[in-house]
Image (spheres, rainbow, N blue to C red):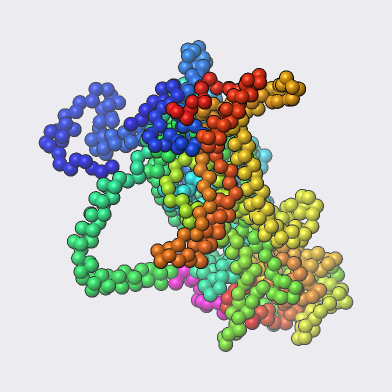
Amino acid sequence: MAEQGNGESGAAVTGGEGGSESSAVDNPGLPPHRPRLADVDEKAAKRNERQVSVLFLISIIGTILSFIGYFVVGQTEGNLGDLRLQNTLLGVGTALAMLGIGLGVVHWAKTLMPDHEIVEDRKPLRTEEDRAEAEQIVTEVIDETQIKRRPLLRNTLIAAALIAPLPAVVMFRDLDRSDDFGPERMRHTLWDEGVRLVRDPTGTPIRASDLTIGSAMHVIPENLPEISSHGERIAEKAKAVVLLMRMNPDDFEHTSPGRENWTHEGIIAASKVCTHVGCPVALYERHTHHLLCPCHQSTFDAAREFKVIFGPAGRPLPQLPITVDAEGFLVARSDFTEPVGPTYWERGEA
Amino acid sequence: MSASKTTYTEADYLAVDEYEPKTSGGRIANYMDKRVAGTGMVREFGRKVFPDHWTFMFGEVALYSFIIVVLSGAFLTFWFDPSMATTRYDGSYAPLQGLEMSMAYATSLELSFDVRGGLFMRQLHHWGALLFVMAMAVHMLRVFFTGAFRKPRELNWVVGASLLLLGMGAGFTGYSLPDEVLSGNGLRIIDGMLKGLPVVGTYISFFLFGGEFPGSEIIPRLYSLHIFIIPALILVLIAVHLFLVVVHKHTQYPGPGRTERNVVGFPVGPVYAAKAGGFFFIVFGIMALISGTFQINALWNYGPYDPSPVQAGAQPDWYIGVFEGVLRLVPGTIGDLSLDWVIPTPWGGNTVAFPILLGILPVAVLFIGMFLWPWIEAWITGDRKERHLLDRPRNAPTRTAVGTAAVTFYMIMWGMGANDIIATHFSLSLNDITYWSRVLIFVGPVVAYILTKRICLALQRKDRETALHGHEAGVIEVSPDGGFHERHQRLSDHELWTLTSFEAPRPSGPRPNAKGKVTAVEKLRAGLNRMWFEERVAPVTREEYQQALEHDHHDEDGGLEAAGSSQGRITRGGD
Ligand code: HEM
Ligand code: FES
């Protein structure tokens, strides 16, 4: 079946494919085979043999190098310089070990193994005879089940098979293991009337005088550190993080009715959770009063109640209403008045 | 492969038992063969022919990098603990000592600092993952631009496209495992995108994270996806993919001696096996070199996940860039109009997050288009034949143009994923880059389409010239009447065949259906078909070639040398 391209041009070209009358020439068959140096000169072949063995020897050296990296450098004890050295030795050693073998074998194949191209016929993907036989088998099998003659069997089987997988789907319900299941919980955060704004991560409370005009501060609610479960704490923090800025009160360009007392002496607080897909909006430019989300560059204007002025966010950042308590520390007036973070289906008018 | 024989004589059975192998190798082979019937395999594969071309290498690279990733990943599993339980870090990296973090992050740090070679394995795993997806992507482009997806290989194209998606899934789930700031932010974006899906989105997010983001469930869940479900699927699909390659036999580039009915190449044993096997070691070696010398994902710099800090300018793995970029491209507001639309309902309204949906749409269109392409193209061209000879990309100008248009579309979104880097690097305004990209995403693909088609047609014309008049020999001659000519060297038949053996059909008008009616769909098809085939450069026909030869012949009387080949061509029509 396979035919060696024996060095002459014109190896097997199967009938009918030699080019039609309209093509410029007929398919001329394989080009003539040119012998390599090693095919005609035993000295050249010997040289290739030596080259291949040298590559294999280099591989052995590479393996030894890896051992040096592992044992001689040893435990790096958190020393980054040693760690890098070890990593480099392991990498270069392994690289030599692998490349030596790989290049050696390929060189061997290219110079010493036969380089005659072989022509092989493609088998038809299936023969007509096979298809007919297969079709008959299938027909017989179906007939023997009698499923066509007995529709009751068929219909009840289909009904059963359709609903049988449903329990398996339903069982995924408990993927959500929390007690307060459903989207309603997304409307609430740890903020509430009188909850102090404290520094993240130290937890120290903040006085208005701690903030100079133009400065900003990363803030969490004072009751956050009280949550002992790491997972719950992070989940609450993911909703409650706030950026606190102090501006010149004259710079506020717009205050909606009802929000007049949401700021304190030019201090204004916004949710740090981007209304696009939720990254922390962490960059504040004091001169422009712009907040920038580094993920997709939504830009919010603090002077205009965090209105979106650029980027993919569709809504302003929710503002946290603040005031000071009796001791002069900044506190929240209430929770956020709308859900923080990315838009979701059930969010509605908010 | 129909079984020709279904009944056997006692002698047939006895022959198996009584056979005495003569060499020691033969004895081992015989032992195995009697138990697992290996003869058939050896007969089938031992000398199977594989066509060789450097562009057939990318699929191999993908396979090998997957193997590297599985091996290095298996090593990581022995130390990595995919748990979100809290611990205080007491490993040897001083700056993080005493910090509260999850076991996942702590053991990732342990792998980096306290397990010798752990850092190397982590880097090998990560670089391997990047190469895996890259190799698949390039392999897919090769298959696309050469038309290797055509009948009978359409389903294998779908298998390949699924592998590409799974590879990206494997990469993303892996990237998220170490539970530091970068991976947490990546998950945060996924959470936000899921929530943007209408009706089901919020619940999908809850189910994935086990409650509200991020909770304490996500890492173990990603882990079972990352090391079990996705790799298992990839493995199965790779097996199917390679099985189909064997069933179909590999395609080959057009050339002398190659036809739709044969395969020309090297036999598996020994040449192909040696080259392919050796190549595995080469890929491994290169990856080891990169992992030993280039740092990747230095996660001790990021700190444990915390929803508050971010790393500005952080780049996701390259294949995620396109998702990131397209999200940056969509405006969230147009003037004062928000693209978060509220549908008023009695229960307080529902919100449709168009900034997110519009950000998913282009990528979805691209990927769905990719899956369906073999059928779309066959429907337009009306081609129902088996195709085992590849197209040189220039000989399928419209496909090549569609391909570059799609690549341009992708690249603009991908580039937007790095617009901040581009802005700081070239001192441009970030906002301007974004505005321009919003225009470019529509204009760019069209320009790419037109340009590519022009270039392909020009290249085809050049091929025609070469076929008709030969190569320029680089020798200028002065004719007796003072004119200058460059001497041309005729092509050999072998070269000529490579340049002229392709098809360039004419558009086929709308065909009426069985009822004799031309449907609207058929009109659309015919329109696309016209776009596809209208501009064509036909291959050189025998007649044209004969004429060119005769022309040369006349020149020869005037003192010009005509032929570069020794074969008598004028009589070619007769052989
Ligand atoms: C199927 C293709 C795979 C891809 C594309 C992939 C990709 C990744 C990536 C990008 C990471 C983050 C790497 C880093 O932190 O530097 C990762 C982490 C990890 N992968 Fe894979 N992976 C694959 C398969 C596997 C397999 C098969 C295993 C185990 C049998 C595995 C085990 C791990 C482990 C334990 C980690 C976390 C360890 C750490 O980051 O320190 N992966 N993977
Ligand atoms: S998450 Fe802030 S812009 Fe996308």
Range covered by the magenta-colored residues: A173-185
Q: Position of residue B530 (x, y in %)?
A: 56, 55
Residue B574 is covered by the magenta coloring: no
Comparing A343 with B368, the one in front is B368
Left or right? Give the position of A251 relative to B343: right
Give the quadrant of residue B431: bottom right
Q: Quadrant of the N terminus of chain A?
A: top left
**Quick check: can you spot residue B9?**
yes
**B240 is higher (above) or lower (below) than B52:** below
Residue B17 sits in which quadrant?
A: top left
Q: Is residue B69 above or below residue B14?
A: below
> Which residue is at a point 41% across and 72% down the rendered structure image?
A170
Q: Furthest residue to the bottom? A: B346
Asked whether the viewer can see residue B278, the reply is no
Q: Percent from the top left, x then y, of residue B420?
A: 73, 55
Where's the C terminus of chain A, which quadrant? bottom right
